[in-house]
Amino acid sequence: MADNWNRGHGAVDDMLDGENKLLAENLASKVSRLKSLAYDIDKEAEDQNSYLDGMDSNFLSATGLLTGSVKRFSTMVRSGRDNRKILCYVSVGLVLLFFVLYYLVRRIQN
């Protein structure tokens, strides 16, 4: 009778062992998938950081250009009457250019 119990017990052990192996394989595949996702997230974060660094340098260069333009503009305003006349023409031209570009962009979008 003890021999029967051991044989039955061995079959249960084999079944449990097979089930454990199947579960271990499933777990290994899930861990592999998570590892792949973590690598992709890390790669994407590095790409985004490099993109933001590039944007930072672009904004700094644009800030430098605007600062120089404002300095030249204020120098022109403080100078004589002839420069003020040119300044008015340039200002009107820029406003007209803005409206023309706005009109063209709206027309392209529609």
Image: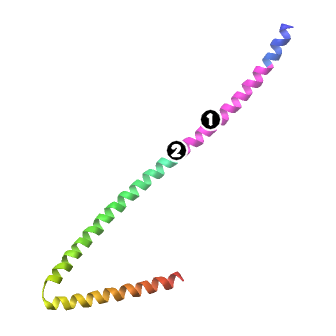
Judge from the rendering whether residue 27 lies leftward or rightward of residue 62; answer left or right.
Answer: right
Q: Earlier in the sequence, mark 2 or mark 1?
A: 1
Q: Residues within 10 Å of mark 1 (few under 14, many from 20)?
A: few
Residue 38 in the image: above or below residue 20: below
The single residue placed furthest to the left in the displayed view is 80
SS class, disc 2: helix
Residue 103 located left or right of residue 1:
left
From the top left corner, tell me how far across and down residue 57 is, in percent: 31, 61
What is the chief secondary structure element of the magenta stretch? helix
Q: Residue 6 placed where, x, y %? A: 80, 12
The residue at which mark 1 appears reads as 28
Instruction: Write the start and end of the magenta stretch as one range.
Output: 11-37
Secondary structure category for the residue under label 1: helix
The amino acid on which the numbered mark 1 sits, given as a three-letter code, is Ala
In the image, 98: left or right of 75?
right
The image shows a total of numbered marks equal to 2
- Residue depicted at x 32% and y 85%: 94
Q: Which mark is residue 18?
A: none
Q: CA distance from mark 2 to mark 1?
A: 15 Å
Image coordinates of residue 41 in percent, x first then y, are 50, 48
**Residue 38: image tag:** 2
Residue at point 85%, 12% (across, down): 4
Q: Is residue 35 magenta?
A: yes
